[in-house]
Amino acid sequence: MFKRSWFWDRLAKRYARMPIPDQASYETKLEKTRALLRPDSRVLEFGCGTGSTAILHAPHVALVHAIDYSPRMLEIAREKAGAAGVTNLTFAQATLAELDSPAGSWDVILGMSVLHLLPGRVQTLARVHHLLKPGGVFISSTICIGDASWPMRVLAPVFRALPLLPSISSLTLSQLKGEFERAGFKIEDCWRPGVNKAAFIVARK
């Protein structure tokens, strides 16, 4: 955890200033997500980074609890939420495995741009399934480098070889969907604007 936190802590300020690389796709994901939110929804986001997505969704639900393992990312997220005047959004430093939350606690769980960075993805999907209410939805956006053009595919082993950089999985979209289904999810929506773009998946428990 120290290795991963060190990298994201060092990157946090720069990351917060970076423009969204594909604004149109991001807006589409926001719209698709909001269609699944209700005023009484309890939402959990893991790997929330600097909180941008959680802040945008918070006005549409009862509450959002967002977690990340980088204290510097969370510091920036709290500053942004305060500046936005969001009052139903809380942050905590934790991994999904460490989260103290009973089974069936959440209507919606978000994992945006994070599954391809996790070594224990199968365990993570099982944990998400455990934490969701029956009928709840898991919404994710995941880079599937195994399907990408070769310049992107060579990045995964390079990142794994460097000691202080986060590992990136070489999974394909087909593999990812299979992992969702084996975890007990039914995939309701799968949208990807291109092979080099992240796959947006809505999966229901």
Image (cartoon, helix red, strand yellow):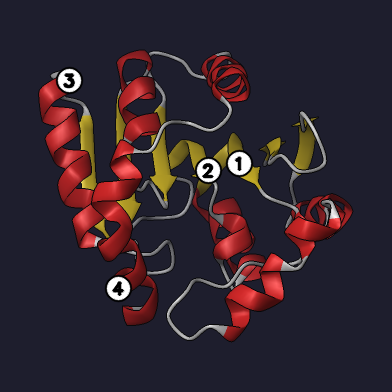
| Residue in the picture at 62% in, 67% down | 168
Secondary structure at numbered mark 4: helix
Secondary structure at numbered mark 1: strand
Query: Is disc 2 surrounded by few (<14), some (14 to 19) or many (20+) residues within 10 Å?
Result: many
Q: Which quadrant would the N terminus be assigned to in this image? A: bottom left
In the displayed structure, does residue 185 sit left or right of residue 41?
A: right
Give the mark, 3 or 2, whose residue is nearer the N terminus: 3
In the displayed structure, does residue 1 sit left or right of residue 153?
A: left
* Coordinates of residue 181 in the picture (x, y in percent): 81, 52
* Coordinates of residue 174 in the picture (x, y in percent): 88, 52
Decide which of 153, 102 is in the foreground and name it: 153
State the residue position of label 4. 6
State the residue position of label 2. 112
Give the mark, 2 or 1, whose residue is nearer the N terminus: 2
Give the mark, 3 or 4, whose residue is nearer the N terminus: 4
Give the mark, 4 or 2, whose residue is nearer the N terminus: 4
Q: Amino acid at mark 3?
A: Ala
| Residue in the picture at 16% in, 40% down | 78
Label number found at residue 30: none
| Picture layout, residue 82 above or below residue 151 | above
Q: CA distance from mark 3 to mark 1?
A: 24 Å
Give the mark, 3 or 1, whose residue is nearer the N terminus: 3
State the residue position of label 3. 84
Q: For marks 3 and 1, give the one nearer the viewer.
A: 3
Label number found at residue 140: 1
Q: For marks 4 and 2, give the one nearer the viewer.
A: 4
Marks 2,1: beta carbons within 8 A: yes
